[in-house]
DNA sequence: CGCATATAGGTGTAGCTACACGCATATGCT
DNA sequence: AGCATATGCGTGTAGCTACACCTATATGCG
């Protein structure tokens, strides 16, 4: 298998990753459903709780398109969980968490923990460790798209 | 008061996974854009090329909701890349690849390979190996949702 | 000051994802 | 045969994701 193109045996890295992400997302969402929140929303909320930031800063941290973040924030704002206020520069927005958002976060935390524990139990300590280190390594090595657009 | 942030939210397996998936998907899509196809569509097409199957069988293999697959197939059918014919059981559909679909697959293959190689180069042999084994291990250990619904 | 350019953010469009539910056909039971 | 149930698939609804492009404001330079 020397010449060029390693691989087909492992399949497409992206497709495998997407498949795993679908499975894991379903597990988390199933647990969080009892609090009527999705894991994507929970992550956003938890991240927002770390301090007020502009949309751009927030999007850069999450490595998410600004427009994606903008849209993902909309349902959270509609639920009254995040606040979107105008910043010093009137073009900018400050994204923050409301009291209701913090309450929701507190209510959802045990469900999130249960999901996390279920995954850990299924994968085993070693499996989780290997997966995490693979993910972290990849996140460190792959180009962060910031600066591009 | 215990507002001391309780739990380190940075270990959310799902969020990390989703972040990585966003990055990797962007890399693949950037390469495949020259053939006006997305990595999700490419994967679907490549999978369909392995033989005609019903929507349910296909969805079970990909561990994707049937309705999701149905919708993802629509743009491919619109492009004339996949065929959707009525099976022996008139309720069922046979999903197959057209000649145009195979041509598209052939044209996109080198681009897919370049994306795959870029990821491998960035991660290094070891990084890719670790990531892949972590993914495969997780896919083997996590419950396959089939049977549920 | 006035204009060119850069920056912050949203819209339009398009595709991916899943759950609840509905429709049509098949199958099993009496 | 006739009806109850199961199966195969699509629709409705809702949310996630990103690129291209637009608007509005800020900033820099003459």
Image (cartoon, coloured by chain):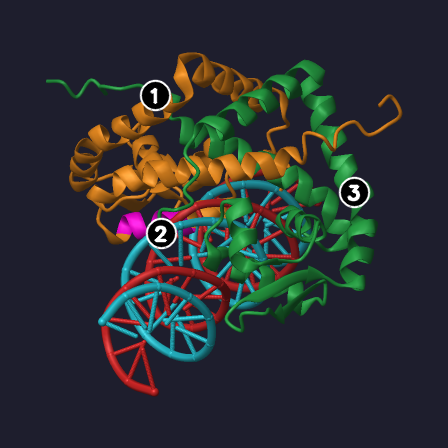
Chain colours: A orange, B green, C cyan, D red
The tally of labels here is 3
Q: Which mark is residue A121?
A: 1
Q: Quickly name the residue at label 2.
A: B149
Q: Is residue B85 left or right of residue B109?
A: left
Badge 3 marks a residue whose secondary structure is helix
Q: Is residue B130 above or below residue B13?
A: above
The answer to which quarter of the image holds residue B77 is bottom right
Q: Is residue A18 left or right of residue B16?
A: right
Q: Rounded to the nearest whole Å, what is the CA distance between mark 3 and mark 1?
A: 39 Å
Query: Which mark's residue is nearer the viewer, 3 or 1?
Result: 1
Q: Nearer the viewer, residue D28 or A44?
A: A44
Bin the neighbour count of mark 3 within 10 Å (Cα to Cα): few under 14, some 14-19, many 20 and up.
some
Bin the neighbour count of mark 1 within 10 Å (Cα to Cα): few under 14, some 14-19, many 20 and up.
some
Q: Quickly name the residue at label 3.
A: B111
The residue drawn where x is 78% and y is 37% is B113
Q: Are marks 3 and 1 on the same chain?
A: no
The residue drawn where x is 70% and y is 17% is B124
């Amino acid at each position: 298998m020397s010449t060029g193109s390693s691989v087909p045996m492992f399949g497409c890295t992206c497709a495998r990753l997407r498949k795993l992400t679908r499975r894991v997302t379903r597990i988390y969402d199933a647990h969080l459903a009892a609090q009527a929140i999705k894991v994507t929303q929970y992550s956003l909320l938890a991240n927002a709780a770390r301090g007020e930031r502009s949309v751009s800063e927030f999007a850069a941290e999450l490595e998410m398109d600004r427009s994606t973040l903008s849209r993902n924030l909309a349902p959270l704002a509609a639920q009254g969980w995040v606040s979107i206020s105008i910043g010093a520069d009137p073009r900018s927005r400050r994204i923050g968490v409301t009291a209701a958002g913090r309450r929701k976060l507190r209510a959802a935390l045990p469900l999130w923990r249960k999901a996390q524990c279920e995954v850990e139990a299924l994968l085993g300590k070693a499996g989780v460790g290997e997966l995490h280190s693979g993910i972290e390594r990849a996140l460190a090595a792959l180009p962060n798209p910031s600066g591009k657009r």
